[in-house]
Image (cartoon, rainbow, N blue to C red):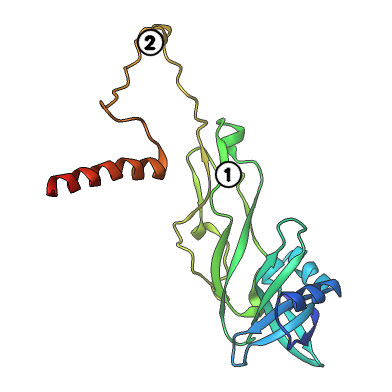
Amino acid sequence: MAQTQIVVEGAPRSDRGKNEAKRLRQTGKVPAVLYGGKGDSIALALNTKQIGAILRSATGHNTLFQVDLAGKHEPAILKDWQVDPLSGNLLHVDLLRVAMDVRMRVNVPVHTFGEPAGVKQQGGVFEVVTREVEIECLPADIPTEFKVDVSALMLNSQLRAKDLAIDTAKMKLLTDPERVLAHVVALKVEEEKPVEAVAADAAAPAEPEVIKKGKKEVEGEEGAEAEAKPEKAEKGEKKK
């Protein structure tokens, strides 16, 4: 796994607030914060296109890149980001400093391929239960993904986290080894009732609704308050 040589243009920003953030976005920049490690938190303006390209890359948010701050490069990864739900534009980004000699915890996606024998031969259904696992490793050893061939998976068989081909010399699995990632299950078919049972259900009279005398049906919080007020009034009359 070669170290990624991606450089993202960054510039410190002193002004904060919605107006400043909006102005930055109009100039092709996205507000960001760089934190973690031994350095202080720094408010930045980053190149939006470069950050977007990282998120769309094969390594995604686990991409290791360099933040260029006036010629000084700081290794970092994307820790969190906010996207406008309507336009899809980046609104804000959090960057985490990376020390190349310090192990870190990351989530890595798990991708399966192949048609399970339990589906092809036994009529089962293949379901993905967990799409990523957490590992601990050095930044340069962060894998892009874990690819698993599920062709041999039979009916009622599971793919578990412990089945992944993890290089234990470089990384440690933090997810529960018994966690089910995918399985082949039987297709559930609803049992149809016999004709006699359906006819009996249709002929059975509906149970009459029981309505308390002197009370109207009320729903929701307003109804609860309406019912509570008369009770308080009755208590007050008894005290008199």
The N terminus - image quarter: bottom right
Q: Quadrant of residue 82?
A: bottom right
Answer whether residue 136 is visible to the viewer in this image: yes
Q: Nearer the viewer, residue 150 or 69?
A: 69
Q: Which mark is residue 152?
A: 1
Give neighbour class at mark 2: few <14, some 14-19, many 20+ (Cα, 10 Å). Answer: few
Q: Which mark is residue 197?
A: 2
Please indicate whether residue 125 sits to the left or right of residue 53 in the image.
Answer: left
State the image coordinates of residue 148 (x, y, percent, origin top left). 62, 54
Q: Quadrant of residue 214?
A: top left
State the image coordinates of residue 216 (x, y, percent, origin top left). 34, 30
Please indicate whether residue 236 sits to the left or right of residue 162 in the image.
Answer: left
Q: Is residue 161 above or below residue 10?
A: above
3D distance between C-alphas at marks 1 and 2:
43 Å
**Disc count in the image?**
2
Please indicate whether residue 36 sits to the left or right of residue 90 in the image.
Answer: left
Q: Amino acid at mark 1?
A: Ala
Q: Nearer the viewer, residue 236 or 143?
A: 236
Q: Nearer the viewer, residue 195 or 93?
A: 93
Q: Nearer the viewer, mark 1 or mark 2?
A: 2
Q: Amino acid at mark 2?
A: Ala
Q: Is residue 18 above or below residue 154?
A: below
Give neighbour class at mark 1: few <14, some 14-19, many 20+ (Cα, 10 Å). Answer: few
Residue sitting at x 49%, y 60%: 162
What element does badge 1 sit on? loop
State the image coordinates of residue 138 (x, y, percent, origin top left). 60, 80
Q: Is residue 57 above or below residue 131?
A: below
Q: Is residue 55 above or below residue 197?
A: below
